[in-house]
Image (cartoon, grey):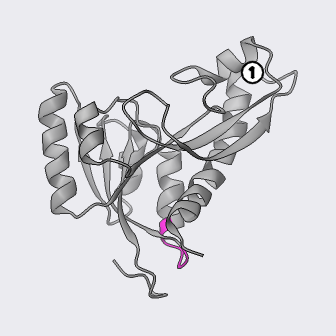
Protein backbone atom coordinates (compact mmCIF):
# COMPACT_ATOMS: atom_id res chain seq x y z
CA UNK A 1 0.00 0.00 0.00
CA UNK A 2 1.52 3.32 -1.07
CA UNK A 3 0.25 6.45 0.63
CA UNK A 4 -0.50 9.72 -1.18
CA UNK A 5 2.97 11.02 -0.26
CA UNK A 6 4.59 8.10 -2.03
CA UNK A 7 5.50 6.56 1.33
CA UNK A 8 5.08 2.83 1.21
CA UNK A 9 2.79 1.98 4.13
CA UNK A 10 3.10 -1.27 6.04
CA UNK A 11 0.01 -3.46 5.98
CA UNK A 12 -1.01 -3.82 9.61
CA UNK A 13 -3.45 -5.91 11.62
CA UNK A 14 -4.69 -4.74 15.03
CA UNK A 15 -5.69 -7.36 17.63
CA UNK A 16 -8.24 -6.25 20.25
CA UNK A 17 -10.46 -7.69 23.00
CA UNK A 18 -12.39 -4.68 24.36
CA UNK A 19 -13.25 -1.03 23.80
CA UNK A 20 -10.61 -0.56 21.15
CA UNK A 21 -9.62 2.99 22.11
CA UNK A 22 -6.01 2.33 21.06
CA UNK A 23 -7.33 0.67 17.89
CA UNK A 24 -9.44 3.75 17.01
CA UNK A 25 -6.42 5.92 17.68
CA UNK A 26 -4.17 3.78 15.45
CA UNK A 27 -6.78 3.84 12.66
CA UNK A 28 -6.89 7.67 12.83
CA UNK A 29 -3.09 7.76 12.86
CA UNK A 30 -2.90 5.40 9.86
CA UNK A 31 -4.89 7.89 7.77
CA UNK A 32 -2.27 10.61 8.17
CA UNK A 33 0.00 11.11 5.15
CA UNK A 34 3.06 10.74 7.35
CA UNK A 35 1.90 7.50 8.98
CA UNK A 36 4.02 4.43 8.15
CA UNK A 37 1.09 2.00 8.61
CA UNK A 38 -2.06 1.05 6.75
CA UNK A 39 -4.67 -0.77 8.87
CA UNK A 40 -6.00 -3.62 6.73
CA UNK A 41 -7.53 -5.92 9.34
CA UNK A 42 -8.80 -5.96 12.92
CA UNK A 43 -9.03 -9.22 14.79
CA UNK A 44 -10.99 -9.55 18.03
CA UNK A 45 -11.01 -12.31 20.64
CA UNK A 46 -14.41 -11.07 21.83
CA UNK A 47 -17.49 -10.81 19.61
CA UNK A 48 -19.01 -8.24 22.00
CA UNK A 49 -15.97 -5.94 21.89
CA UNK A 50 -17.04 -2.30 21.45
CA UNK A 51 -14.17 -1.91 19.02
CA UNK A 52 -15.96 -4.20 16.54
CA UNK A 53 -19.04 -1.96 16.55
CA UNK A 54 -16.85 1.03 15.73
CA UNK A 55 -15.43 -0.79 12.69
CA UNK A 56 -18.87 -0.90 11.06
CA UNK A 57 -18.33 2.81 10.29
CA UNK A 58 -15.09 1.98 8.45
CA UNK A 59 -14.18 -0.21 5.50
CA UNK A 60 -11.72 -2.22 7.58
CA UNK A 61 -12.23 -5.97 7.58
CA UNK A 62 -12.81 -7.51 11.01
CA UNK A 63 -12.61 -11.13 12.13
CA UNK A 64 -13.66 -12.66 15.45
CA UNK A 65 -11.98 -15.68 17.05
CA UNK A 66 -12.92 -16.89 20.52
CA UNK A 67 -9.56 -18.69 21.05
CA UNK A 68 -11.21 -21.70 22.73
CA UNK A 69 -9.31 -23.98 20.37
CA UNK A 70 -6.17 -21.86 20.38
CA UNK A 71 -3.94 -23.81 17.97
CA UNK A 72 -6.74 -24.31 15.50
CA UNK A 73 -7.59 -20.61 15.56
CA UNK A 74 -3.98 -19.48 15.36
CA UNK A 75 -3.51 -21.56 12.19
CA UNK A 76 -6.57 -19.89 10.66
CA UNK A 77 -5.34 -16.45 11.73
CA UNK A 78 -1.89 -17.05 10.19
CA UNK A 79 -3.58 -18.04 6.92
CA UNK A 80 -5.65 -14.84 6.92
CA UNK A 81 -2.57 -12.73 7.71
CA UNK A 82 -0.66 -14.39 4.88
CA UNK A 83 -3.53 -14.03 2.42
CA UNK A 84 -3.91 -10.32 3.22
CA UNK A 85 -0.10 -9.84 3.15
CA UNK A 86 -0.01 -8.42 6.69
CA UNK A 87 3.50 -7.41 7.75
CA UNK A 88 2.87 -6.04 11.23
CA UNK A 89 0.59 -6.87 14.15
CA UNK A 90 -0.29 -4.25 16.77
CA UNK A 91 -1.81 -5.67 19.94
CA UNK A 92 -4.13 -3.07 21.48
CA UNK A 93 -5.86 -4.29 24.62
CA UNK A 94 -5.67 -7.86 23.36
CA UNK A 95 -6.33 -10.09 26.36
CA UNK A 96 -5.22 -13.45 24.97
CA UNK A 97 -1.71 -14.86 25.08
CA UNK A 98 -0.37 -15.88 21.67
CA UNK A 99 1.48 -19.18 21.45
CA UNK A 100 5.28 -19.36 21.08
CA UNK A 101 4.72 -20.94 17.69
CA UNK A 102 2.57 -18.06 16.47
CA UNK A 103 5.05 -15.48 17.76
CA UNK A 104 7.93 -17.35 16.09
CA UNK A 105 6.13 -17.38 12.73
CA UNK A 106 5.56 -13.62 12.97
CA UNK A 107 8.91 -13.00 14.63
CA UNK A 108 9.86 -9.38 15.31
CA UNK A 109 6.68 -8.08 13.74
CA UNK A 110 4.31 -8.07 16.72
CA UNK A 111 4.07 -5.00 18.97
CA UNK A 112 2.12 -4.44 22.17
CA UNK A 113 1.25 -1.49 24.38
CA UNK A 114 1.28 -2.17 28.11
CA UNK A 115 0.00 0.16 30.89
CA UNK A 116 3.10 0.21 33.09
CA UNK A 117 6.76 1.13 32.93
CA UNK A 118 8.06 -2.31 32.02
CA UNK A 119 9.78 -4.41 33.32
CA UNK A 120 7.65 -3.36 36.34
CA UNK A 121 4.11 -4.70 36.63
CA UNK A 122 3.84 -7.20 33.83
CA UNK A 123 0.43 -8.81 33.34
CA UNK A 124 -2.86 -7.53 34.75
CA UNK A 125 -4.00 -5.01 37.42
CA UNK A 126 -1.02 -2.76 36.78
CA UNK A 127 -2.62 0.41 38.19
CA UNK A 128 -3.77 -1.23 41.44
CA UNK A 129 -0.33 -2.74 41.97
CA UNK A 130 1.52 0.52 41.30
CA UNK A 131 -0.71 2.42 43.77
CA UNK A 132 -0.46 -0.31 46.43
CA UNK A 133 3.33 -0.14 46.21
CA UNK A 134 3.26 3.66 46.68
CA UNK A 135 4.99 4.25 43.35
CA UNK A 136 5.52 7.90 42.47
CA UNK A 137 5.33 7.14 38.75
CA UNK A 138 3.71 4.68 36.42
CA UNK A 139 3.21 4.96 32.67
CA UNK A 140 3.06 2.93 29.51
CA UNK A 141 5.42 0.99 27.28
CA UNK A 142 5.37 -0.06 23.63
CA UNK A 143 7.41 -3.22 23.18
CA UNK A 144 8.08 -6.14 20.88
CA UNK A 145 6.21 -9.31 21.72
CA UNK A 146 8.27 -12.38 22.52
CA UNK A 147 7.37 -15.71 24.09
CA UNK A 148 7.54 -14.33 27.66
CA UNK A 149 4.68 -12.16 28.93
CA UNK A 150 5.40 -8.42 28.57
CA UNK A 151 9.13 -9.09 28.28
CA UNK A 152 10.07 -8.10 24.73
CA UNK A 153 12.47 -5.29 23.84
CA UNK A 154 11.04 -1.88 24.73
CA UNK A 155 10.65 0.62 21.88
CA UNK A 156 9.34 3.65 23.81
CA UNK A 157 7.99 4.49 27.26
CA UNK A 158 6.13 7.43 28.80
CA UNK A 159 6.19 8.26 32.50
CA UNK A 160 3.03 9.41 34.30
CA UNK A 161 3.06 10.87 37.81
CA UNK A 162 0.87 9.14 40.39
CA UNK A 163 -0.82 11.73 42.63
CA UNK A 164 -1.83 11.09 46.26
CA UNK A 165 -5.51 11.15 45.34
CA UNK A 166 -5.19 8.84 42.32
CA UNK A 167 -7.09 5.58 42.30
CA UNK A 168 -6.81 2.79 39.67
CA UNK A 169 -9.58 4.40 37.58
CA UNK A 170 -8.08 7.92 37.50
CA UNK A 171 -4.60 6.54 36.89
CA UNK A 172 -5.91 4.33 34.09
CA UNK A 173 -7.49 7.38 32.38
CA UNK A 174 -4.27 9.40 32.65
CA UNK A 175 -2.16 6.57 31.28
CA UNK A 176 -4.59 5.79 28.43
CA UNK A 177 -4.25 9.39 27.22
CA UNK A 178 -0.49 8.86 27.02
CA UNK A 179 -0.90 5.45 25.34
CA UNK A 180 -2.75 7.18 22.50
CA UNK A 181 0.27 9.43 21.94
CA UNK A 182 2.94 6.80 22.54
CA UNK A 183 1.81 4.03 20.16
CA UNK A 184 1.94 6.22 17.00
CA UNK A 185 5.26 7.72 18.18
CA UNK A 186 6.74 4.24 18.63
CA UNK A 187 5.53 3.15 15.19
CA UNK A 188 7.10 6.22 13.61
CA UNK A 189 10.35 5.61 15.47
CA UNK A 190 10.42 2.00 14.40
CA UNK A 191 9.21 2.27 10.82
CA UNK A 192 10.21 5.68 9.51
CA UNK A 193 13.71 6.14 8.19
CA UNK A 194 14.84 9.67 8.87
Q: Is residue 167 above or below residue 94?
A: above
x and y, in percent, of residue 153 in the image: 52, 41
| Total tally of numbered discs in the picture | 1
Q: Quadrant of residue 47?
A: top left
Give the residue displayed 37% in from the left and 82% down from the top. 2
Give the prevailing secondary structure in the magenta stretch: loop
The front one of 194 and 85 is 194
Give the residue displayed 23% in from the left and 31% down from the top. 66
Q: Is residue 144 left or right of residue 100?
A: right
The front one of 101 and 63 is 101
x and y, in percent, of residue 11 in the image: 34, 66
x and y, in percent, of residue 123 in the image: 51, 23
Q: Is residue 67 left or right of residue 118?
A: left
SS under mark 1: loop
Give the residue displayed 64% in from the left and 31% down from the top. 116
Residue furthest top as drawn: 132
Q: Residues within 10 Å of mark 1 (few under 14, many from 20)?
A: some
The front one of 169 and 57 is 169
Q: Quadrant of residue 159?
A: top right
State yes or no: residue 12 in magenta. Answer: no
Residue span colored magenta: 30-34
Q: Is residue 93 above or below residue 126?
A: below
Give the residue displayed 49% in from the left and 31% down from the top. 150
Q: Quadrant of residue 104?
A: top left
If the image is split into quadrants, where does the C terminus sit?
A: bottom right
Disc 1: which residue:
167
Amino acid sequence: MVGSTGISKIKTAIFISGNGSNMKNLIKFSKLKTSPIYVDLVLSSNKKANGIRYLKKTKIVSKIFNFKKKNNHEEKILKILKKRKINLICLAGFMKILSKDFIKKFNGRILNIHPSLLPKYKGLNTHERAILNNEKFSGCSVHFVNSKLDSGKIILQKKVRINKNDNPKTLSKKILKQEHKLYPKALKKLLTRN
